[in-house]
């Protein structure tokens, strides 16, 4: 949801005349935002709370300050119908990456834009149009925290993360290697909550021109 415009929409959607913002209005505003803002799917998974895919937020801007929608991603490339096409936008993905084997795994990013990758909290790739590669010392079946950010400042979108397991060829990272847990859900939900708070504050302190 675009927090910058949510306050304007609340004013015109909920109240037609000049008003004094109060607690009852705040409750009504939150209820309306709950209906229109995208939500994370309910957490369901195995005993450890693991859920398939990476959890992410699409932003209206490549600086990733204005959240637009939440997504679950099962393959790490730009070929996704949930992603915007043209224009400037950003994407932040969180979750876990799990290798089926122990050893040195080569991770490679190809992009015409800008992609950054973190593994286990450490920045390992900061790729522009020339792409970038890193080596991951993986342990079989051990999930490692992953964060990926994609910033698009000119269309069309183009990025892909591939891996090469020991003794194997280069291939797309399979869906079975991607997961997220409740801690990732909490981080993504916090982005949505912050957007709500900013929207409510804008309604609480509106531009007088919006109340004419």
Image (tube, rainbow, N blue to C red):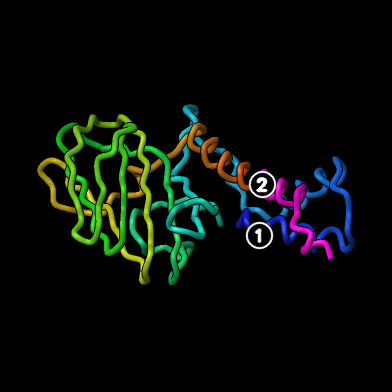
Q: Residues within 10 Å of mark 1 (few under 14, many from 20)?
A: few
Numbered circle sitting on residue 5: 1
Give me the residue at 76% from left, 52% from top: 32
Question: In the image shown, does 51 or 77 lie closer to the viewer?
Answer: 77
Drawn side of residue 16 relative to residue 33, left or right: right
Element carrying mark 1 = helix
Q: Earlier in the sequence, mark 1 or mark 2?
A: 1
Which residues make up the magenta segment?
197-212
**CB atoms at circles 1 and 2 under 8 Å apart?**
no
In the rendered image, which quarter contains the N terminus? Answer: bottom right
Element carrying mark 2 = helix
Q: Position of residue 123 (x, y in %)?
A: 28, 38
Numbered circle sitting on residue 31: none
Q: Which residue is mark 2?
A: 196
Give me the residue at 13% from left, 47% from top: 168
Drawn side of residue 86 relative to residue 25, left or right: left
Question: In the image shown, does 189 or 59 lie closer to the viewer?
Answer: 59
Q: Residue 198 magenta-drawn? A: yes
Q: Nearer the viewer, mark 1 or mark 2?
A: 1
Q: Toward which corner of the image does residue 166 lie, by quadrant?
A: top left
Give me the residue at 86% from left, 59% from top: 15
Question: Which residue is at the far front?
Answer: 208
């Amino acid at each position: 949801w675009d927090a910058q415009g949510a306050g304007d929409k609340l004013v015109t959607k909920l109240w037609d005349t000049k008003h004094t913002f109060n607690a009852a209005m705040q409750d009504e505003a939150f209820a309306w935002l709950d209906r229109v803002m995208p939500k994370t799917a309910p957490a369901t998974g195995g005993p450890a709370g693991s859920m398939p895919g990476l959890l992410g937020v699409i932003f209206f801007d490549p600086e990733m300050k204005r959240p637009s929608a939440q997504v679950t991603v099962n393959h790490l490339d730009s070929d996704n119908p949930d992603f915007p096409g043209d224009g400037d936008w950003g994407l932040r993905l969180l979750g876990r990456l799990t290798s089926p084997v122990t050893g040195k795994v080569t991770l490679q990013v190809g992009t015409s834009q800008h992609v950054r990758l973190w593994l286990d909290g450490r920045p390992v790739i900061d790729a522009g149009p020339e792409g970038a590669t890193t080596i991951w010392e993986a342990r079989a079946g051990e999930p490692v925290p992953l964060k990926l950010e994609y910033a698009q400042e000119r269309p069309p979108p183009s990025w892909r993360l591939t891996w090469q397991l020991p003794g194997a060829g280069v291939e797309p990272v399979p869906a079975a290697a991607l997961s997220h847990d409740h801690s990732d859900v909490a981080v993504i939900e916090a982005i949505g909550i912050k957007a709500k708070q900013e929207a409510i504050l804008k309604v609480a302190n509106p531009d007088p021109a919006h109340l004419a």
